[in-house]
Image: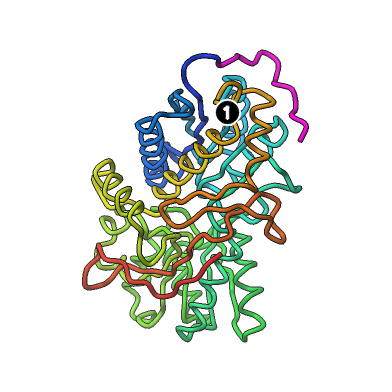
Amino acid sequence: MNAPPSPPGAERADGASVRIGALVPLTRPGWTEAGRHLLAGLELGVGDVNAAGGIAGRPLELVVRDTAADPQRAATAVDELAGLGVAAVVGEYHSVVARAAAARADALGLPFLCSSAVLDALTEEPTDWVARLAPPQSHGWRTYADFLLGAGHDRIAVAAEPSVYWASGTRILRDHLAPRGGTVVELDMRELGPTGVCDEVVEHRATALLLLVGNPEPAVSIVKAVRRDERLADVLIGAPAGQPEFAAWARLLGDDGAAVPFLRYLPERLGPLGVRVGTALRERLAEAPSFVAFEGYDTITVLADVLRSHGENGADVGHGAGRARTAEAWPRVAVEGTRGKVRFSRTPGIGVWQWDGAPIQVVDRDPADLDRFRILRAGGA
């Protein structure tokens, strides 16, 4: 692989630490709760790597930039981080933001290990510079569609806001359900409020309503409206993007937030590493860690292994040749993470190096205990 030259004005990072750039949504309109969990996982991972001796004796240093769910802000951050001499960029939760970051990282020749974003088309063209831990959206959302069919739902309404991510999700659902006799009707949230959504669900005789909208609003208001509408007593509310994963969902909705199936990327049982990390994350977050926090931890675990194995003792990992060696190592990764052994491969239709063994679950919060999650369906990427 030919490494592009460093951008003009790039600072050499020949100090004691190995710098890693981290992209995280920490302010609105970003999904800040997801950002907080992602950062907690990244920080815990860095702490554990450094406690084990760092990268050939050099500590990892996380250089965090808030993307606030803004693609342009993320692209600008990648430029800045490249100039600071980071060895790689990690993180990001929002798919459209990660796509902008991936494009910029590819153009600069900067390795990007994407933690959480799932959009299939993370890059327009295949690239060797980008790898991803989260399963592609098409894999997860097809699992969700199979869950719907298995639960007897073939007339699906989706309350959707304008977004490449939401549009992609709607298309995946429709393409998967249609050959199996299912139908998907899209409700445009630019034109409808919560009451209007209820009316449309009744009119279309949908048996399930999926929330392809922002969190907490308008998702929370829609749930409250549906729960209070006697016409919709038997309608399933679903949230494939994972809004109910986080504690704020239960705080804001109480019992109304139960039995809303969503996707998460955890195995049925964590191994010893996952259990240990889960305990440490719970202490750091002061609440149950989400799958996003585990994705953050695994990101650092994988990247540290790559830097130790292929970074020439960490001497030049923040410059062209070292960055190229890091990217060249993606297909040789075999690292035990909290959720299984991570290996990257080329997946048909996906332009980045992809972990094809990420666990996929459809779960919901138990009406009898909101802090307990029920596994409704399990699959793999």
Of residues 127 and 372, the one drawn nearer to the viewer in this rendering? 127
Q: Amino acid at mark 1?
A: Ala
Q: In this rendering, is residue 127 above or below 376? A: above
Secondary structure under tag 1 reads loop
Image quarter where the C terminus lies is bottom right
| Residue 268 coordinates in the image, percent (x, y) | 38, 67
Find the magenta span and give its range: 1-13
| Residue 199 coordinates in the image, percent (x, y) | 46, 74
Query: Is 185 on the left or on the right of 195, as rendered?
Result: right
Q: Is residue 162 visible?
A: no
| Residue 40 coordinates in the image, percent (x, y) | 36, 40
Image quarter where the N terminus lies is top right
Identify the residue at horizontal 53%, vertical 33% (top origin): 308
Q: Is residue 302 visible?
A: yes
Q: Which residue is mark 1?
A: 87
Q: In this rendering, is residue 364 above or below 151? A: above
